[in-house]
Every structure is written in C-alpha cells, then in structure tokens.
Image: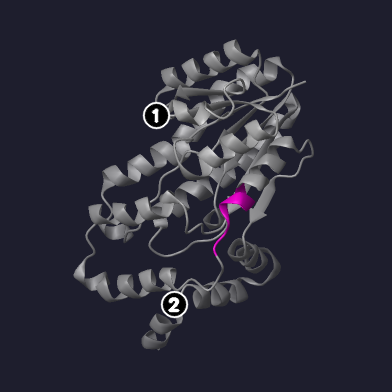
Amino acid sequence: MTQTILITGCSTGLGKMTASHFAAQGWNVVATMRKPEPDLAAAYPDRVLVHALDVSDPRSIDAAIRAGIERFGALDAVVNNAGITMVSVFEATPTEAIRQIFETNVFGLMNVTRAVLPYLRQRKGGTIVNVSSGVGLVGVPLLSIYVASKQAVEGLSESLAYELESQNIRIKLVEPGAMRSTSFTSSGMAASAEAPVPDAYRAYFDHALQSMIDYPFASTEERSVVDAIFEAAADRSHRLRYVVGPDVEEYARLRWSTSEEQYQDGMGRLMGQTVWRDMAQ
C-alpha cells in the first residue's frame, strides 16, 4: 500500500530534494511551504500535493494535514525539516531574532508534531522524522542560538521516542553535518547583518568565521542527507539517531567516546579555539 508523508520547508534546498526523492520512490507527498510553488508537483502530479503551511500558524498546519488526508486518504509519516539559522555573537543578537529562530526550529516543530499525533494514533502507528543538525550534539561558536534550538529538538525527540512507543509511533533524528551547497548556510550568513559585531568581539568573530570557512571536513552532500531522511522514515526499528557527514561523525566520537577533557580539547582544536587559549595563558 502506498504510504503518505508530509514534509515541511519544501520551497528550496534539502526540503525540495527530499519531497522529490520520496515521490520518486513511490510515496505520496504533501510538500508544504509558507508560499506554495506548484512546480514542485510537475514531475509527479499524481503523487505530490503542494500546500501552504506556516509552522508558526496552527490553522495552516491543520489545513495542510486535512488537505493531504483528503487527497491521499491517509497520513503515515512526517518530516519536520523547516528551519532557520543565524551567525552572530550571542551578546549582540536581537531578542526578536532569537525568538524567531526558536519559533521556527522548536515551537514550529512542536506545533506540527502535536497536530499530526492524533492522526497517527488513529492509524495505530507512524513515524516522525525531525531534521536536527550536528550541532544538536555539540556547541559551536557564532551559532549559539541555532545550537540551542537544535539541542532542544534533540532532547524533545529523545523524550518523545520513549513516550510515543506506547502509541506505536516512532521518532527519528537526522543529524546532518555542514552542507555548504544549501541556501540555508547563505541565509544564515546574511542574517548576521541583523546583529552588528561589538568591537570587543571583532577579532574573535573574524577568526571564528574564518575557521568556519576553512572547515577541516568535507561538506556533507545533500543527497546523503536525503537518503538518511528516507531511511529514517522507512525504518520501523527503534533506532533514534541517523548521523550524516564526516564532521558529525567526529563530533559524535568526541562526545560519546572520550572523556570530558578530551572532548573539550578536541572540539577546541576543531573550532580554532587554541589561539585564544594560548593568549589567555
């Protein structure tokens, strides 16, 4: 029987690729975004429904869910992909920008999840895939608000994974590394203009930003992340995390397989912190 999946954040990049991949694999897809772009359904008009959905608006979430069920008869899985980021020094990050990131990355994900749970319970099972990030495992400089939002998603997802076993509903976390080819990264860089860098942080900001540019790992391919999302959605096991990318593999190794001191030293080297630590001595 053909399965149906609802995916958020499908207007560009990873979300759009994910929607197309599921359709190519024979799934029905409710591809959602704030401003619908019908061309996404052109290749698979019988399998893809493009619908408006703003994760901060419960009414639009409910409308998209209803439309998907009316079109395809059921809803089996959800991918919470919508997300935003920002490169900034925490001290200078506007409160409104902080709230906007949490509104999308955390509360928006919660809104969609709470809205779909009654339908999945009624069907006596289903899968929710939350697209997190490698920084859901570790902290990195200049992305403190984004990191905080993704670590909130990690904690929520792990807790729900236990809670929803009672309803035969699986929670999955896909943790991608840095994807330099996505519009997500460039939009995050552009958003830094909203938070001017204080003079006291300028030298550090420039150094840390250059460390991002000179990232010591190969970028994570979007296709690998799409494959991981598909694997997670189709996987009926209790596996929670799907790590994707060489950087996240190293983060996970440091986080879970070393002492706290080794972890901090290792991450410090990766983030270019040794310069500042040497100066402090």
- The residue positioned 39% from the left and 81% from the top of the image is 276
Q: Is residue 95 left or right of residue 154?
A: left
Label 2, secondary structure: give it. Answer: loop
Q: Is residue 279 visible?
A: yes
Whether label 1 touches label 2, CB < 8 Å: no
Q: Nearer the viewer, residue 44 or 22?
A: 44
Q: Is residue 216 above or below residue 67?
A: below
Label 1, secondary structure: give it. Answer: loop
What residue is pinned by disc 2?
273
Q: Is residue 114 above or below residue 192?
A: above
Q: Is residue 86 visible?
A: no
What residue is pinned by disc 1?
34
Give the distance between the C-alpha atoms of the residues marked 1 and 2, in whole angstroms: 39 Å
Looking at the rendering, the stretch of residues picked out in magenta corresponds to 219-225
Say what amino acid the circle numbered 2 marks.
Answer: Gln
User: Is the residue marked by circle 1 packed among few (<14), some (14-19), or many (20+) residues within 10 Å?
Assistant: some
What percent of the width, then of the height, locates residue 166?
Answer: 75, 27
- What is the quadrant of residue 88 in the picture? bottom left
User: Is the residue marked by circle 2 packed among few (<14), some (14-19), or many (20+) residues within 10 Å?
Assistant: some
Q: Quadrant of the N terminus?
A: top right
Q: Is residue 190 above or below residue 110?
A: below
Q: Quadrant of the C terminus?
A: bottom left
